[in-house]
Image (cartoon, grey):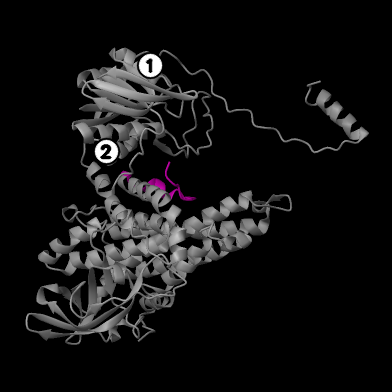
C-alpha cells in the first residue's frame, strides 16, 4: 500500500502568539515549532496501515528549511521517506493543496492521510481541497478506520453521535483525535532516521487565492474595579459607566 | 506536545534533531508510563518491573552502544538527555537504566570477549536480561581499593569469594559485573545468576530509592569460567564504568531539579494566601529564582560536558564537578520546593518528598559529594587529601 501522509509544522500549543511587525503574520521569535498534533494521528494511522498491508509511508510537507525538523520526526516514527516542497509557510490553503496534489499525482498513493486541521490557521480546508484537486473521495475527521480490499470504512464523530461512511481507494482521509495512540519514536529508530532521505522539491508556484489582510490578538480583558453599594458609590458607578466606559 | 523543561538560556535550542527527538521521546515515555505509576511503587517499596520491556523497546538500555548489539548508537548528549528525563520521573528508574547501560553493558562491551558480548549485550538491550554491578562492599565504600572480595585461579577459571553491598538491581539481575582482587590487582568477572554459591538477597528498610531494588551479593566458592574474566586490570576498570554512570547522574539530577522547580512554580501561582497567589510574595520569588538560577547553571554544565564527552575531550574530574554540583543543587531545590509547597509538600500528590529522599542516595552513591570534592581538590592542588 502506497501511503502519503501530509504533515505541517505549527507553533507549540503553549505559545503566547504575538503579531509580527508586518501585521499579517505571527512573530516567530522564540516560538517553538512542533509537528501538528492532529498530523501525529494521521502519521500513526499510515504506519499502522503499512504494518498491516505492507508498502511504504511517505511523509510530505510544504514549508521552509525548518520544516525538515518535523520530517525527521516522521522518519524517526517510522516513515520510509520524506519530501519537502520548499515554499515559505503561508496562509493560503489552495496553494499548499495545489502543490501537494501535483506531487501526489506522480506518486499514485492508495491512501492520503492528513490531520483534520493544522492548529495554526485552523482552516480545515486541506483534505477536501486536496481530494477535489485529485478527483478523489474524501472523508474528514475520522475516528476509526478499516480497509478491506478496495473498500474503506470510516467512522466519524458528529454532533451527538457517530456516522459510518464507506468509500473506495484511493481516498483522502483526515484524522480526528482518538483514531489511535501515536507512538513515540524509539531511540534506535531516531538514529536510523538520520540516514533516510529527505527529498527536496522546489516550490511549484501558484497564485495565492487568498491573502491575509490583518491579524489581531483578542482584546485582553480589562481590569475591573471593586466598589461598594452605598448611595454615593452607586452614583460613582453610574458616572463611570456613562463617562469612562460610555455604555449608558 | 512533549514536556518542555525550563530553559532560561535556550540550551535545548542547540540540540541536533536526533538529540531533540531523544529528549522528547523519553519525556513522553516518562509522562505517560512512569509518573502515573511511580508513587504507588515508591510507597510499596517495589520496582515497577512492567517498565523494563517498555524501556527496552524505547531503546533506553545501552543508548550509546552500536546498533549491531540491538542498541541505539546515539551520542552521549542524547544519553544525558534521556537520563535527565528519566530522573524527572524518579531517581530509581534512572538508576535502573544507568546501571544497566553504564555499569553492565559498558564494561561488557569494553572489556569482555566477543562471545560474552554476543551472549549478553542483545539480551540486556532487549530487557530480557537485567544486570548489576558489584564494587562496593560492607566495609569498603569510598575506598574500593581495600576490597576483600577475591578470586583464586583454579583449573579452567577462578574461584570467587566475598560479599558486595548496596547493589542496585542485585536481586533482579541475570548477570553481574563483579570486581574482585586477583593476585593483588582489581579484576572484573561476569557472574551469572544460578552459578553455584552466588546469591543476592534484597536489602529492605530504605527511606530512599524505594522504587528500586538494592541488594547484597554473596559469593561462596563461586566457580567462574576463564572466558568470564574481563580484559582490564586495576581500579581504572571499575572507575571507567563509574565515570560513565556519574556522567548520566549529573544530567539526571538536573531532571529532578526541573521536576521540583516546575511543581513549585505551578503551585506558587495557584496557591492563594492573603488573597493573592503566594508567587506574588518576594520571599517565594526569591526561592523560585534561586532554583531557576541553579538549574540554568547545571544545564550549562551538562551541555558542555556532553560536548566534551562526545568529542573525546572530557576528563573524569570534569564529571566529578558536574555530579557534585548538580546533585547538590537538586537536593537543595527539592528542599526549597517542599518549603514552597507548605504542608502539601509532604504529600504523595506532589513529587517533592520522593525526589528529596531519593537524592540523599544519589548524593552518596557513585562517589560521595565529599569524595568528589577531594578528587577536584587533588586535581587543582596536586595533593591527594584522602590517601
Q: Is residue B224 above or below residue B15?
A: below
Q: Are marks 1 and 2 in contact (CB under 8 Å)?
A: no
Left or right relative to B95: residue A49: left
Q: To which chain does the residue with label 2 belong?
A: A
Residue B204 lies in quadrant: bottom left
Pointer 2 residue: A75
Q: Residue at x 88, y 31 (%)?
A: A234
Q: Is residue A14 above or below residue B387?
A: above
Image coordinates for residue A123, horizontal then vertical, percent: 45, 21
What segment is highlighted magenta in the picture?
B1-17
Q: Are marks 1 and 2 on the same chain?
A: yes
Indicate the secondary structure of the residue bearing disc 1.
helix
Does the rendering let one see residue A204?
A: no
B4 falls in the magenta region: yes
Mark-to-mark CA distance, 1 and 2 = 26 Å
Could you tell me which quadrant the C terminus of chain A lies in?
top right
Pointer 1 residue: A94
Q: To which chain does the residue with label 1 belong?
A: A
Left or right relative to B347: residue B314: left
Image coordinates for residue B55, horizontal then vertical, percent: 31, 54
Answer with mark 1 or mark 2, whichever residue precedes in sequence.
2
Amino acid at each position: 500500500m502506497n501511503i502519503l501522509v501530509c504533515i505541517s509544522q505549527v507553533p507549540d500549543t503553549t505559545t503566547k502568539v504575538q503579531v509580527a511587525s508586518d501585521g499579517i503574520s505571527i512573530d516567530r521569535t522564540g516560538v517553538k515549532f512542533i509537528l501538528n498534533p492532529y498530523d501525529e494521528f494521521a502519521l500513526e494511522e499510515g504506519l499502522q496501515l503499512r504494518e498491516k498491508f505492507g508498502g511504504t509511508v511517505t511523509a510530505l510537507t510544504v514549508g521552509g528549511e525548518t520544516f525538515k525538523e518535523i520530517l525527521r520526526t516522521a522518519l524517526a516514527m517510522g516513515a520510509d521517506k520524506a519530501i519537502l516542497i520548499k515554499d515559505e509557510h503561508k496562509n493560503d490553503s489552495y496553494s499548499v493543496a495545489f502543490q501537494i496534489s501535483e506531487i501526489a499525482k506522480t506518486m499514485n498513493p492508495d491512501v492520503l492521510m492528513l490531520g483534520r486541521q493544522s492548529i495554526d490557521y485552523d482552516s480545515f480546508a486541506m483534505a477536501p481541497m486536496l481530494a477535489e484537486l485529485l478527483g478523489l473521495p474524501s472523508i474528514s475527521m475520522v475516528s476509526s478506520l478499516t480497509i478491506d480490499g478496495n473498500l474503506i470504512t470510516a467512522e466519524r464523530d458528529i454532533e451527538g453521535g457517530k456516522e459510518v461512511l464507506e468509500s473506495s481507494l484511493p481516498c483522502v482521509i483526515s484524522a480526528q483525535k482518538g483514531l489511535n495512540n501515536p507512538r513515540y519514536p524509539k531511540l534506535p529508530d531516531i538514529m536510523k532516521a538520520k540516514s533516510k532521505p529527505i527529498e527536496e522539491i522546489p516550490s511549484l508556484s501558484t497564485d495565492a487565492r487568498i491573502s491575509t489582510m490583518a491579524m489581531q490578538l483578542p482584546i485582553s480583558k480589562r481590569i475591573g474595579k471593586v466598589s461598594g453599594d452605598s448611595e454615593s458609590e452607586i452614583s460613582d458607578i453610574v458616572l463611570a459607566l456613562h463617562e469612562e466606559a460610555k455604555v449608558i | 506536545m512533549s514536556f518542555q523543561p525550563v530553559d532560561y538560556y535556550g540550551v535545548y535550542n542547540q540540540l541536533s534533531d536526533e538529540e531533540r527527538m531523544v529528549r522528547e521521546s523519553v519525556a513522553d515515555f516518562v509522562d505517560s508510563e512512569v509518573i502515573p505509576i511511580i508513587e504507588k511503587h515508591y510507597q510499596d517499596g517495589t520496582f515497577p518491573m512492567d517498565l523494563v520491556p517498555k524501556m527496552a523497546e524505547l531503546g533506553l538500555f545501552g543508548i550509546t552502544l552500536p546498533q549491531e548489539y540491538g542498541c541505539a548508537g546515539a551520542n552521549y548528549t542524547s544519553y544525558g538527555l534521556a537520563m535527565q528525563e528519566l530522573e524527572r520521573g524518579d531517581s530509581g528508574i534512572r538508576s535502573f537504566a544507568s546501571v544497566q547501560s553504564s555499569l553492565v553493558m559498558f564494561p561488557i562491551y569494553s572489556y569482555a570477549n566477543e562471545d560474552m558480548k554476543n551472549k549478553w549485550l542483545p539480551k540486556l538491550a532487549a530487557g530480557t536480561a537485567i544486570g548489576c554491578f558489584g564494587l562496593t562492599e560492607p566495609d569498603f565504600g569510598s575506598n574500593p581499593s581495600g576490597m576483600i572480595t577475591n578470586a583464586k585461579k583454579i583449573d579452567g577459571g577462578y574461584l570467587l569469594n566475598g560479599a558486595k553491598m548496596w547493589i542496585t538491581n542485585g536481586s533482579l539481575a541475570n548477570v553481574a559485573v563483579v570486581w574482585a582482587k586477583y593476585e593483588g590487582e582489581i579484576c572484573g568477572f561476569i557472574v551469572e545468576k544460578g552459578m553455584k554459591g552466588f546469591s543476592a538477597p534484597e536489602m529492605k528498610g530504605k527511606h530512599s530509592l524505594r522504587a528500586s531494588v538494592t541488594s547484597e551479593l554473596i559469593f561462596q566458592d563461586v566457580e567462574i569460567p576463564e572466558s568470564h574474566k574481563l580484559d582490564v586490570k586495576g581500579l581504572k576498570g571499575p572507575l571507567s564504568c563509574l565515570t560513565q554512570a556519574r556522567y548520566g547522574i549529573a544530567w539526571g539530577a538536573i531532571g529532578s531539579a526541573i521536576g521540583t522547580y516546575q511543581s513549585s512554580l505551578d503551585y506558587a501561582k495557584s496557591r492563594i494566601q492573603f488573597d493573592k497567589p503566594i508567587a506574588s510574595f518576594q520571599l517565594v520569588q526569591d526561592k523560585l529564582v534561586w532554583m531557576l538560577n541553579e538549574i540554568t547553571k547545571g544545564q550549562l554544565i551538562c551541555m558542555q560536558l556532553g560536548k566534551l564527552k562526545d568529542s573525546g575531550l572530557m576528563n573524569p574530574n570534569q564529571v566529578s564537578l558536574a555530579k557534585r554540583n548538580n546533585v547538590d543543587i537538586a537536593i537543595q531545590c527539592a528542599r526549597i520546593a517542599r518549603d514552597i509547597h507548605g504542608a502539601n509538600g509532604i504529600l504523595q500528590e506532589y513529587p517533592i518528598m520522593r525526589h528529596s529522599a531519593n537524592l540523599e542516595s544519589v548524593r552518596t552513591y557513585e562517589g560521595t559529594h565529599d569524595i568528589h570534592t577531594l578528587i577536584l581538590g587533588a586535581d587543582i592542588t596536586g595533593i591527594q587529601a584522602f590517601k
